[in-house]
Image: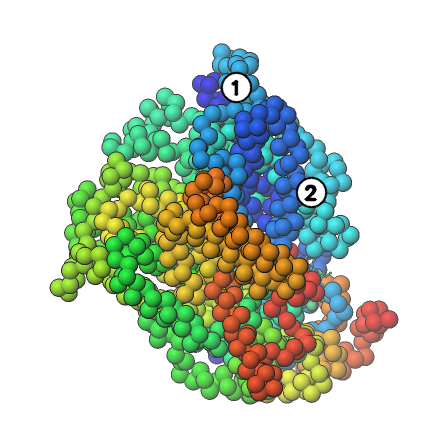
Amino acid sequence: MWPYVIGGLVLAGVYSIATLGLILTYTSSRVFNFAHGAIAFFLAIFFHWLAVDHGWNPKLAGAFVVLVCAPLFGLFLWWALFRRLTHATSTIRLVSTIGLWVALPAIGRILFVGREEIFDRTGVGPTPAASWIRVAGTVIDSDEFLVLLVSVVVAVSMTVVLRYTPYGLQVRATVDSPRQAGISGINTNIVSAGSWMIGTTLAGAAGVLLAPLKGYQELNFTPLVLAMFAAAVIARFHSLVMGVVGCVLIGMTQSFIPSKWVRDDFLYRILPDQSQDVLISKLPDSVPFILLLIFLLCYRGLDRERFAVDTRAVASEAPPPTARDSDGWLRLRTPAILILIVLLAPVPLAGRWEAIIAKGLAVGIAFLSYTIVAGEGGMVSLCQVAFAGVGGAMTAQLATNDSWTWLPKVNGLLAIFLAALIVVPFGLLVALPSLRLGELYLAMATLAFAVLTQNLFFQSASINNFDGGVKVPRPEVFGIDFEGDTPFYYLLVVLFVLAAILVMNVKRSTTGLNLAATRSSEIATATLGISVVRNRLIAFGVSSFLAAFAGGLSVTYVGIALPAREFDALIGVVWLAIAVTWGVRSVAGALLAGLSFALFPQIFAEFEWFILVLFGLIMLGIRSNVRRVVVQRVALAAWAVFWLGAFLVWNGNLDEVPLIADSIREIPTTLFGLGAIGLAKEPRGIVYDVSHRSRARRAERAARRSADPPPGTTGSPGLDLTTPEAAQRAQDEREVMLP
Amino acid sequence: MSEVAGGPLLEARGVTVAFGGLVALSDVSLSVPPATIVGLMGPNGAGKTTLFGVMSGLLRPRTGTVSIDGHDVTRASPQARAKRGLARTFQRLELFGELTVREHLVVAHRARHRRLNLALDLLGLGARPGPGEDDRVDAVLSDLGLESVASRSAAALPLGTGRLVEVARAMASEPKVLLLDEPSSGLDTRETEQLGEALRRLHAGQGVSLLVVEHNVEFVLSLAQQVTVLDFGRVIAEGTPTEIRGNHAVQAAYLGVSA
Ligand SMILES: Nc1ncnc2c1ncn2[C@@H]1O[C@H](COP(=O)(O)OP(=O)(O)O)[C@@H](O)[C@H]1O
Ligand SMILES: [Mg+2]
């Protein structure tokens, strides 16, 4: 009994330290930091780098990282990113920190880990941990004791600070009403910068304390991330007490799973024989999200909160200035060119590259699902990858009829279609309870769904087949045999085009109009008699269909359905980052996202010089797109020096430059994460940015020719919501109508 | 028409709303009879917008009831109220920044007339205008003089035009009772006149009831048949425009703020 209790308390302690920081930053700035766990990981490996690679005294290193570097890092992140997000649209707010979540661990590994993974467990205390005290016959070692001590200190001091100091008063005032606080002279900037510093410090503390217990791989931090997200939902993102309660619940449940009472007497009885052990080993990671879903259902009744909370967010939405239909053919031209390239690609690129592009096409259809759910619906879904995985798994079952013999066996292509249809109700079920509660709850519910599917469904014996997966035959349709790679490749192209047409249809339909209306003003849409929830549900349903369809195609192309590996929940997070980086508003964005997801890792692995090309392109991009002359010059200089150096010093043999050689794996992820972070500045993604620029240039040229300013570009005074600043101004002027 | 003969089309009874400690409305009752223009006046912060929020379903009152056409809608969603024939405009513009002006009206018109048909939407047939849609939308556009900006994006409109778009959108949803929150603020004299004309036509032609919040006292008093005056969340006067003109409490309330 006691070992489990103490184990649970230790887990709860680490979780609470991180969760308190997470809730504090959310309440003071309304930005939910998805990267909180990533920051913990980043600071933990930084600590390891100091303590092990550079031989610092661990205690000194720990204090330096947690008490000096972490607050500074928090201040930097606040200055560079978070402070811009408070007034961004809710989607951008979510996606930017998700980008940080993707990029930060990769950057950390580039900087602090190098070629070999870290396997030791050096901590602040003695290594290996000394046994410290005994409670009820159970040893608490030094690392565990430290966790308990710090968590109590943090909880107590947070309470004292928030209750009794001026800073705490200001935080609470800001929480109650940011606008009111702003009026009454509280400098919300200082309050929120302070909160981010404290939040990052707590993340760092949790990381440095957790690593010696669990290890220094990113994998070891996933439980922390999942637990604190769930605890934050349980706390409804503001209650510190409920946050700690959630952490204790999660920690205790996780700790008791391997116990006789839970495992032998309960789990072994209810779980199916074959998958028992795998499922039980995955259960601790599922616990937070099972609890999360339970609490979500309890909070469902609070749907009134929705309008109340959201009117302010809606007010700050900065809608893109383009009319939707004015650029119809431009929207078509880019995808048409891309499709043409893709159509011709197999000619010179038969074999492996063809296969990779084919993969990209299949994933591209999954990215089209983001065009619907995020681009049209304005929702952040983290479970498209799970839909794809379930679609793949169901396709395999339907097409082969291997383990689920009660299912009918159908033609491969039909199987993909049916599998996708089966997924739709699940999609609706995930979205329904959280849609009313708001974007953040939806993001959490979808993440929960992805993680639970991953741990409980994908791992079950009939799907995973002991990491062997299920073989999927290639279909034969209308007498055409798609056994060969190239025929299937063209099938993928056709299906991508069909899916793209479907997406365009939805965009132009009444539902599309309603969704566009909802994105700008939810309350105006509602008071016209349009059901916001129903339209969003449609978007979600269509998107889950597309994602599942893509999953089915992908496994059919590969020939094996192994969703546990291919459609991991965290891959879904990277998907989202890629999708938004290219832009979720256009079909071309989805195609580029799919292609780059498949191609980039391969390109980076095979052609190291591609990094240089990319660096050069980025620098040139900065040079031609940034107005500030200084930045332009620096970029040009960096570009020149880099190339010169590349030629002279390294002589093309990049394998010998340690930083680059070691970090190649991490670069695509880093790029996509950074891309998503960049949305804070250009919310519509690369495709929009580029096409908008070229359109602007063309308009400018046309204007010069005719000397007549084009309509709509003349600056008319009045309502201008096109820039974030203007939207902000409009929001400030707005009479706050709802609490 | 299903309305009870003589009963009000829209009625709020004993409505109280508080934000934290601030009581924004206390025991306010207001009714809008069928085919009537009612004015709602009161200095800034009197609670007019809050009352609109309660009536349109965006705010839930602490006490009191709201009914449309004799049906109690106090707990009904904004959508359900719109279906019963309520439409409103917003004091702080709530335009659809990504849509053109014309599309605003299309959205509103379809909200009333088109049933959702997913199959058509997916097949790409959902973009076609429904029967009478184009005519109706064009009629509203020309009624408010918005033809010239019909294909412009709403995001870059001047404030006055934006207000007219709000009104046009509400009209296009073919309401039985239309709530207008300061529709003439930001309009120039000519636009104000045009708006007044359009509202009168709407009222006379289709028998729509209007509840108009206005700062422009002359505008309200010339338009409305009945007027209610709010101050500090309470009704301080009710009556015909002539009665209101002579009411001392109203003069005091207005002098109190404008002085
Ligand atoms: N969301 C809110 N939170 C706090 N106070 C509010 C909120 N909305 C309105 N109020 C207050 O309620 C009172 C009435 O506001 P409002 O209905 O907008 O007045 P009016 O429209 O008559 O100018 C004002 O004092 C205002 O500050
Ligand atoms: Mg008002």
Name the quadrant of the C terminus of chain A.
bottom right
Pointer 1 residue: A127
Q: Quadrant of ligand 1?
A: bottom right
Do residues under tags 2 and 1 come within 8 Å of each other at their CB atoms?
no
Residue drawn 61% across the image and 39% down it: A200
Left-right relation of B59 to A267: right
Residue A40: quarter of image: top right
Residue drawn 38% across the image and 25% down it: A258
Q: A52 or A252, which is in the foreground?
A: A52
Amino acid type, callout 2: Gly
Name the quadrant of the N terminus of chain A.
top left
| Residue A543 image offset from top left, x and y in percent | 38, 59
| Residue A451 seen | yes
Pointer 2 residue: A194
| Residue B201 image offset from top left, x and y in percent | 59, 87
| Residue B86 image offset from top left, x and y in percent | 54, 72
Q: Chain of mark 1?
A: A
Residue A405: quarter of image: top left
